Image (cartoon, helix red, strand yellow):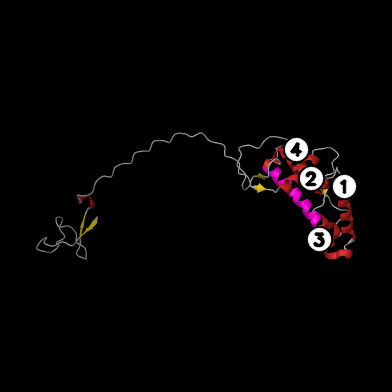
Amino acid sequence: MAYVTQQFGCAGGRGCGCSSCGCRSRLGEWYVRDDDDDDDEARPVPTAKPPRPAVAPRAAPRIGWLGEPPTTAPAQGPDTMERICRSARELIQGTDHFGMRITVHQQNRIRCIVAGVCQPDFDDRYLTGQGVLDYNNGLYSEPYYARARQWLLPEFAVRAGTLRPDQDLWRTLIRIDDDIIQGRGKINYYYHTHGEATPIRIRRLRDWVARQQDNRRSIYWCYRP
């Protein structure tokens, strides 16, 4: 049933309630059946959409670190120090790689480091600024030395069975140079601020660095005055 606006004139102006006049509500509105409406039309039946063609799945690329281009598969290893040396020699020919630029002085020092660590019987030990502080504060009975080869080709990289990206290698070479500079700077800081009262452990480290700078087989040969 549907409401129709109020109507008059049926049976003398009154609703009689007969079958021809229809039923009237208390509000004076007339009810008529929906099937009596002339404006009802049958709705069209929607047709089924044609199926989409099948698309072959594609392998999703690996998402790397910030700034690292995605790769579909890592280069296979396991990596070796020989390959690291080849890549490092090529990288150090320039001063700007992967958005990380170095000075000419840094380039000369790093080139010297690469030439040394790629030779047998080379002493790649060096002191970091944190290593100087830890030894002076008594955390170790002997100085703790970092090793350049372990930074360039760490054990976890060998176990991973993949080749180290050149971007990581370039960043590591810069990090080694920075650590050596900071270690020497920390020793010099103690001498500048303490003078004759410089702790004995700092004096030992200074003497060790001085001897290493005169040793052609030491990484400190690259940092001699």
Residues at marks 4 and 2, CA–CA distance in whole angstroms: 12 Å
Residues at marks 3 and 2, CA–CA distance in whole angstroms: 24 Å
Q: Are marks 4 and 3 in contact (CB under 8 Å)?
A: no
Q: Which of 189 and 157 is in front in this view?
A: 189
> Who comes first in sequence, dot 1 or dot 3?
3
Of circles 1 and 3, the one toward us is 1
Q: What segment is highlighted magenta in the picture?
A: 167-185
> Who comes first in sequence, dot 1 or dot 4?
4
Q: Residue 170: where, in percent of width, then height?
A: 70, 44
Q: Residue 34: where, in percent of width, then height?
A: 23, 52
Residues at marks 1 and 4, CA–CA distance in whole angstroms: 24 Å
Of circles 1 and 4, the one toward us is 1
Q: Residue 168: where, in percent of width, then height?
A: 69, 44
> Who comes first in sequence, dot 3 or dot 2?
2
Residue 6 picture quarter: bottom left
User: What's the residue type where badge 1 is placed?
Assistant: Asp
Based on the picture, tell me whether residue 172 belongs to the magenta stretch. yes
Please, what secondary structure does the residue beneath circle 1 have? Answer: loop
Residue that numbered label 4 is attached to: 85
User: What's the residue type where badge 4 is placed?
Assistant: Cys
> Who comes first in sequence, dot 2 or dot 1?
2
Q: Are marks 2 and 1 in contact (CB under 8 Å)?
A: no
